[in-house]
Image: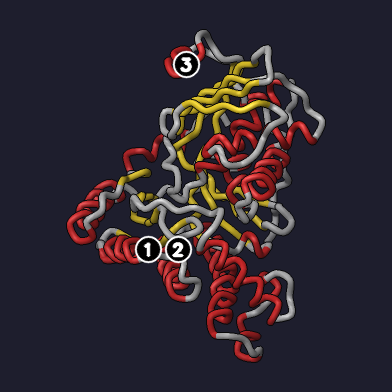
Amino acid sequence: MNNLALPKAAGPGAVTPGRADSSFARTFGGAPEVTVSAPGRVNLIGEHTDYHQGFVLPLPLPLRTTVRVRRRADSLVRAYSAAMQPALAEYRLGDEATGLGWIDYLQGVTALLTRTGQSFSGLEIAIESALPPGGGVSSSAALTVAVLRALHALNDLRPSDVAIAALAHQVETDFIGAPVGIMDPMACSVGRPGEALFLDTRSRAFERLPWPPGIDLMVINSGIAHAHAGGEYVTRRRESFMAAERLGVRWLRDAGEASLPRVSMPEVLRRRARHVITENQRVLDAVTALRRADARRLGALFNASHASMRDDYEASVPAIDALVEIGQADPDVYGARLTGGGFGGCVVMLTAAGRALDAAQRIVATYRTTVGLTGSILMPANQRATIMAGSADQ
């Protein structure tokens, strides 16, 4: 990877002054002190490579999570989100412990910042998000990044975007117990609108790649939620490290596909290793295709990535496979794949410029009639102006 950009500190645009809004005022009265947002992300390609110190290629979404915060005089943290159940939850600083549901992400942030030496009183927090929980578009990372930015702002601190990403990753892995890689918080903290983020998760060096004007992106939510903290995701991760041990490496980034037939291991471990190894190469090939604005090559890589996720990593589910196949059969679609950790979530697809909205509507309609599930279009072509313009609140 050449000419990688060095991380820069977050600018003052990361935080905006608090203004009264209906949810905050209705719940807590008055106005917040700070208002901060962070985007979700779609991973174009590079699935299950980040926890093996490999390469990934995410892109920030125009859909964001906004957090409004005000300090209290006591040690109570009260948080409101209309999208979650219960909508209003609370805990006390110093008593953070998992098991309270969605507010655990906030608990993880305050517990971590307290350990790093920050001090603050209780908080009132209102959260609004356009990101579907469990949709594979980093709703949890966007929330964690936004809350971290807000609490640093309350103490008049401006850590770098990379530092925020590292803290958000620590919250998810150490407090929540989700064995995820660094990609999601990096995409949500460092990513910029209209640019794919080519990230080396080993060095955390990155390059921003402008999105070609001749290619449209669409993201369709399958309606099947997933979770990273347990279940099949954890099993796949464990199997991949077992495969790495058989191959004599700590990280599958350091293994080659040619070594797979020469080493004795159960076939299931061989397939897990093959996915990660070949997916790393697909990311590098996708970067080349993106630089050349080669939509057909990029689409072919999407298709190959999904086949590997389905067959070698077994991280897909039948409904997702059906949605991908419907997309791949559409005459306007160059390629389609499951995005995110798998076992539910979203599908990402490529079309020529101006074709995505019609294609997405056809695909969702066919998905509903053939699979019986209602998909939702998160990124249609008519949002392209939003995707390219982004938000000042980065």
Where 132 sits versus 373, above or below? above
Q: Which residue is mark 1?
A: 335
Q: Which residue is mark 2?
A: 298
Q: Secondary structure at mark 1?
A: strand
Measure the C-alpha gap from mark 2 to mark 3.
46 Å
**Coloured how?**
secondary structure
How busy is the neighbourhood of tag 1: few (under 14 within 10 Å), some, or many (20 plus)?
many
Q: Tell whether label 3 touches label 1 (CB within 8 Å).
A: no
- Name the quarter where the C terminus is drawn: top right
In this rendering, would 324 be left or right of 58? left
Foreground label between 1 and 3: 3
For this orientation, the residue located farthest to the left is: 369
User: What residue is drawn where x is 44% and y is 19%?
Assistant: 23
Q: Find residue 103 and report its image quarter.
A: top right
Q: Position of residue 215 (x, y in %)?
A: 39, 52
Q: Tell whether label 1 touches label 2 (CB within 8 Å).
A: yes
Of callouts 2 and 3, the N-terminal one = 3
User: Residue flagged by tag 3: what amino acid is it?
Assistant: Thr
How busy is the neighbourhood of tag 2: few (under 14 within 10 Å), some, or many (20 plus)?
many
User: Residue flagged by tag 1: what amino acid is it?
Assistant: Gly
Residue 215 in sight: no
Q: Which residue is mark 3?
A: 27
User: What residue is drawn where x is 42% and y is 28%?
Assistant: 82
User: What residue is drawn where x is 53% and y is 79%?
Assistant: 271
Q: Position of residue 85 (x, y in %)?
A: 43, 34
Of callouts 1 and 3, the N-terminal one = 3
Measure the C-alpha gap from mark 1 to mark 3.
45 Å
